[in-house]
Image (cartoon, grey):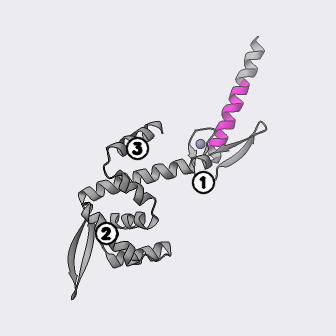
Amino acid sequence: MDDEIKMSLKTKVQDAASDEMSEILSDFSQFYIVLLLNEGPIHGYGVMRAFKNRTGNTLSAGTLYPFLQKLESMGLVKKAEKSTGNRPKIVYTLTRKGRGFTNRLFRRFSAMTASALEPSLETCASCGARVYDGAHHEEVDGVKLGFCCIHCAKAYKHDLVADHSHGEKGSDTI
Ligand SMILES: [Zn+2]
């Protein structure tokens, strides 16, 4: 985790587009537009439709197009005219630079959410795995412990019994 933080700080310093990333991360519409662009070439109307379908909120053309223009001016997105039937459609595609940018953006986003979720995570008392969904709880020697699964709980109790019997043997020999 420490290395991850160091890495993201390093990226932050090196990244000229860092301010832009912070802005996108603080604006859900912008972040979601980048997310949709990352899925593949898409036209403006497609972005608005997918946004509405998936978030239930309306994305206005007045929010979308200036943002797409900005991404284009930064060299992150390129426009292409694609004629389907009679009507030409403008399709937006991430450039190579744009894909690098989105990868870094998503890494920053997951670092942000990981630290936000951290306090709610439990660690398995047996194997040390992080438990994202509800942990399996068992009372062992009067202490309530969390495990990732019943097998780990079983293994933990088994080891505990083994430790105890070692201890008893030890005291017997004295
Ligand atoms: Zn476990």
Mark 1 or 2: in front is 2
Given the image, on which type of amino acid does mark 1 rest? Asp
* Residue in front for this viewpoint, 70 or 59: 70
Please provide the residue range marked out in magenta. Answer: 152-165
Q: Which mark is residue 68?
A: 2
Q: In this view, does 167 lie to the left or right of 135?
A: right
Residue linked to disc 1: 133
- Does 42 lie within the magenta span? no
- Discs 1, 2 touching: Cβ within 8 Å: no
Measured from the top left, where is residue 68 in percent x and y?
31, 69
Quarter holding ligand 1: top right
| Neighbour tally class for label 3: few under 14, some 14-19, many 20 plus, Cα within 10 Å | some
Q: Which amino acid does label 2 sit on?
A: Leu
Can you tell which mark lies on residue 8?
3
Image location of residue 153, percent across then percent down: 66, 42
- Work out whether 143 lies above or below 32: above
Mark 3 or mark 1, earlier in chain: 3
In the picture shown, does residue 24 fall above or below 52? Answer: above
Q: Crowding near pointer 1: few (<14 within 10 Å), some, many (20+)?
A: few
Image marks 3 and 1: residues in contact by CB distance under 8 Å: no
